[in-house]
Image: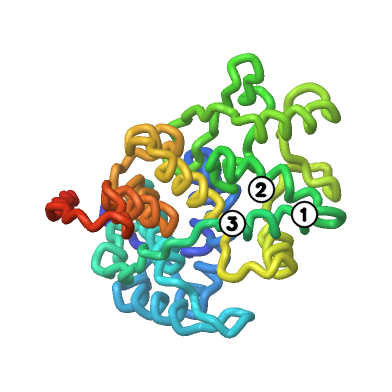
Amino acid sequence: YGRPTGETSFEKFVEEVYRPWARESKRSFENNEKYKLPMIYESKSLKGKTFAQMSPILIEKYKKERRESELKDGKTRKPSTINRELQILSRIFSLAIRYGVTDKNPCVEVSLLPENNKRVRYLLDDEEQRLLSVLIGPRGHLLPLVVLAIGTGMRRGDLFELTWERVDFQRGLIYVPNSKTGRDYSVPMNEDVRSTLQQIRRTTRGGGHVFINPDTAKPYTDIKTAFGTACQLAGIENLHWHDLRHTFGTRLAEAGCSEATIADLMGHSDPQTTRRYTHATDRAKRAAVEAVRLRVCHNPATKQERPPLQVAVSA
């Protein structure tokens, strides 16, 4: 067939070929990737380009453009956000190669940005009380979503995609549609989660999605603004929705659950991911130091000398 000319428009291929393929092949497409595609091909660096014009230097320019451009709040994009876009770009080129549109993927010569994955944030007990107290009135629709996020650790997209056929009240299980890995897993319902779902079920009929936006009568697609407002009203800073999932994992670790159990309950396939949730919390550290207190208390009324105590502490 000869070497591909690469004269196909990048934007046209994305819209006519890649988008339909991704919608059918990627479970996370509707909640994430479909919003990123226009940002990619309409960027200053890539707009109007053909595949023949694409090069590693152009992808580097795109990376620089996205890194330096400011958001509405004056901040810049996180490295992880830009890396996800670069990975989407690479998948577009891989599909184009498969379809004979081009014979090169310039993304393979462009390195990803270093990411800082050490952010540790979870909901503190007093913060939870304040947050729940403001989930009323115009923010009341967030309450069941927050309860399930804390009580099951489900990702936001998985909550949006949850249907009643995946809720098994008889067995007390939720079969989570894992959008990230594509491998479903189950989470038992605690009493908070069960009563919340039962309350919703009493007002619905048949199958369909569990969480429906009352304004659109369709499943939710985003709650970022409402959640941000709720946190602001509750006086909670630097809390993202995903931190509710982190709260779930942290509380499992504090309860003494093994890494294997936490991984199963959170749908992890990589043990390294699970270890991020087993960090030492302040509460766990306090319990640890209390556990190594002197076994014999000093009694000032007794002048009898005691032999030195040997306290062994495992590192």
User: Mark 1 and mark 3 in contact (Cβ < 8 Å)?
Assistant: no
* Residue 95 at least partly seen: no
Q: Is residue 100 left or right of residue 77?
A: left
Measuring from the top left, give residue 99's x and y in whole percent. 38, 47
- Residue at figure coordinates x 28%, y 57% from the top left: 103
Q: Is residue 16 left or right of residue 50?
A: right
For the rendered model, the colour scheme is rainbow
The CA distance from mark 2 to mark 1 is 9 Å
Q: Which element carries disc 1, helix, strand or loop?
A: loop
- Residue at figure coordinates x 51%, y 50% from the top left: 247
Q: Which element carries disc 2, helix, strand or loop?
A: helix
Which residue position is annotated with label 3? 241
Q: Which element carries disc 3, helix, strand or loop?
A: loop
Disc 3: CA contacts within 10 A as few (<14), some (14-19) or many (>=20): some
Q: For the residue marked with disc 3, what is the amino acid?
A: Trp
- Residue at figure coordinates x 82%, y 53% from the top left: 136
Q: Is residue 78 left or right of residue 227?
A: left
Position above or below: 284 against 192: below
Measuring from the top left, give residue 110's x and y in whole percent. 28, 70
Q: Nearer the viewer, residue 144 or 129?
A: 129
Which residue position is annotated with label 1? 135
